[in-house]
Image (cartoon, grey):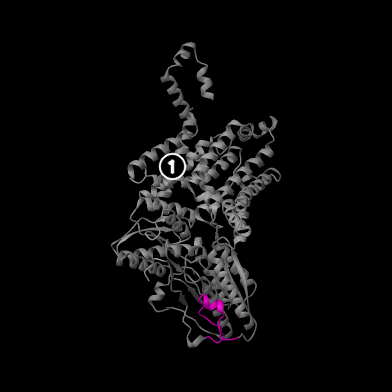
Amino acid sequence: MDRFQLSRRQLLIAGGSGLVLPLIPSPAFAATVPLSKAAATFGAQVAAMGPAPKPLRLAALSFQSAAFWDAIGEGITEATSYLKPLNTTVDHISFGATLDVESVVAGLNAALAKQYDGIAAVTVFDGTVSKVNEIIDAGVPLVAYVADSAQRSKRTCALGQVAINAGKAAGELIAKQLGGKGKIAVITGWFGAPQLDDRMKGAIDYLKTNAPGITIFEPIENKDDANTAYQQASDLITAHQDLNIIYITGGGPEGAAKAIRDAGLAGKVFVVGYDFLPDRQTYLDKGEMLALVSQEPQRQSFDSLVMLHNILAYKATYPTDVEIIAKMTLGKFAKS
Amino acid sequence: MENQSETLSGAPSRRASAASPQFKLSRLAAALVARREASVVAVLVVVFVGLSIASPYFLTVRNLANVAQQISVVGIVALGQALVIISGGLDLSVGSVIGLASVSAALATAATGSPFVGIVAAIGVGLVMGVANGLLVTRLRINPFIATLGTMSVARGSAMLLTNARPQAFDNWASFIGGGRIFGVPAQFIWLVLLTGAVWVFATRTRWGRNIYAMGDNAKAAIFAGIDTKRLTVFVFALCGTLAGFGGLLIAGLLNNANPNLGLGYELDVIAAVILGGVALTGGRGGIPGVVAGAALMGLLRNGFVLLSVSAYWQTIVIGLVVLVAVGVDGARRTER
């Protein structure tokens, strides 16, 4: 999610009680309208159950300030094309480039005022809870995607990756790669950003428990900046010449990978990070990047909107929390 | 210069002793200590010696090259910012201009197939943004803080609009400007040295340079003295923007990649380096070498933190304390005198 790693609802408790389910199509909402080729390619899981009996208007609310949000926009665009022949129109509303609670509430207010039938939104801040509740009380279903507030609202459904589980998956990959022994450094985007903290905690806790032979250095912060990540990776490589992996929870992993390349350490030191972007392919191919954990952004926005279509048109029901399981894009040297 | 004239106005007996080497040395030392940047240089030396003792990796060629690279972009942009602050202004847009210039370089190169056009685009965008800042301040009489706050947002938004917030590849011969090494020395550092020399000569040896100090010290007096302060202000902002644009080009070259979010928050690092270096925020006073020393101190601290595995929370506290100590010591010395 680059520099906009944000808090999302902690689904662990719900997961423990069986509420968190992977979004696998079930007979209750089995596909009746085939997914488009593009939607299938980016891993969409929810197909429309048929055309809406009456015209529906949906709002898709998201930010617009990084490649991650651009990918979210691709999913919205695809859903717009997919649902249009099914009597449902989708409007993409941007919260803007600043990720703060005021922007989200303003976007939700606008959607409410325009009387949409359903809303898909990134309700990441606790300050959005009362507004989300107001929307639900007004009879408008709302699907939270990417990141939901830590404080639970009445939202119809929350769809997204559980950051601590994603961190655990990264930890498992690191432990497997190093055979339980080695040294890793951690660069996080912003201290105090709950999602990034959880990604860090998920990996570190796993490694401490399951691979105690791996030394983990003190985490440092790069403010999601690739240039800062470059400088920090250069320093880390210099200070710890037996360093094996740099784990980056937020933006800028390409900066650290470039530092490894410039130091001539490809194949010896690796980056494990998040979110595949085309410009990172070269580092996966040449071996500076070991793996990137994907959040499937296009799928998240697409599925949210199709779920709303099905809820409104066919009274479909979905689990209240749907976890996007972390998928890895592996690099040249990753042990599969 | 003031100290020198005071010393030379002494009695004949003192003139005789002035020829002795001890006197010359003590006079030189006194002149150095009296300089505004003395505090930051002293702290810089202490940190350098401390890190040399504390970490066996600090004095390695690789690490010194790392440090040289790390201070370069902040140092280069700080040169322009220093002139703006000395002239009595402030430029908050430099970080965003870095981002806009970097993506402009990548997009222009991709569109034309010519990295040379990319170089011109980056520097040109910086120049245009700088001129715009200058015109907003002089023609529309907008306070520099507000004017550059606005252009900061315009530049960042433009970078995102142009790229759809997607990173752009910048992998061509022009990337050597920012990512290359000459005999092991990072190209960025060579640029820093060259530009520091050029800006220092400009600020101290040219009429325009001296006029900037005069304008920052007392704008009304400068106008009465016949200085075209409006033109000078536009020039200073243009130079600052150009250097920020060049900084964006250097980062894109280093990373082989231009991201619209590059340079986010750099304006604070740049302003901190300028203030650390002894430039008065009220304008009219400060030296160019001190600005580079300020950037070097911040770079050294950050490098040292990683080498010594210092907790990130402490890093933030220490950087804040160092700024306070260096500026506070300078202020105390001035009060004593």
Quarter containing the C terminus of chain A: bottom left
Which of the pair B54/A333 is nearer the observer?
A333
Q: Is residue A184 visible?
A: yes
Say whether residue B308 is left or right of residue A102.
left
| Image quadrant where residue A94 sits | bottom right
Residue A209's spot in the image, x, y percent?
30, 66
* Magenta stretch, main secondary structure class: loop
Above or below for B230 versus B175: above
Q: Which residue is mark 1?
A: B322
Q: Residue at x 45, y 55 (%)?
A: A229
**In the figure, is residue A181 to the left or right of B113?**
left
Task: Judge by depth and name the residue closer to the eye, A210 or B333.
Answer: A210
Is residue A45 within the magenta segment?
A: yes
- Residue B156, image x, y percentages: 59, 55
Left or right: where B141 falls relative to B85? right
Q: Residue A7 location, x and y as percent?
A: 47, 65
Q: Which residues are magenta?
A: A31-50
Q: Is residue B109 magenta?
A: no
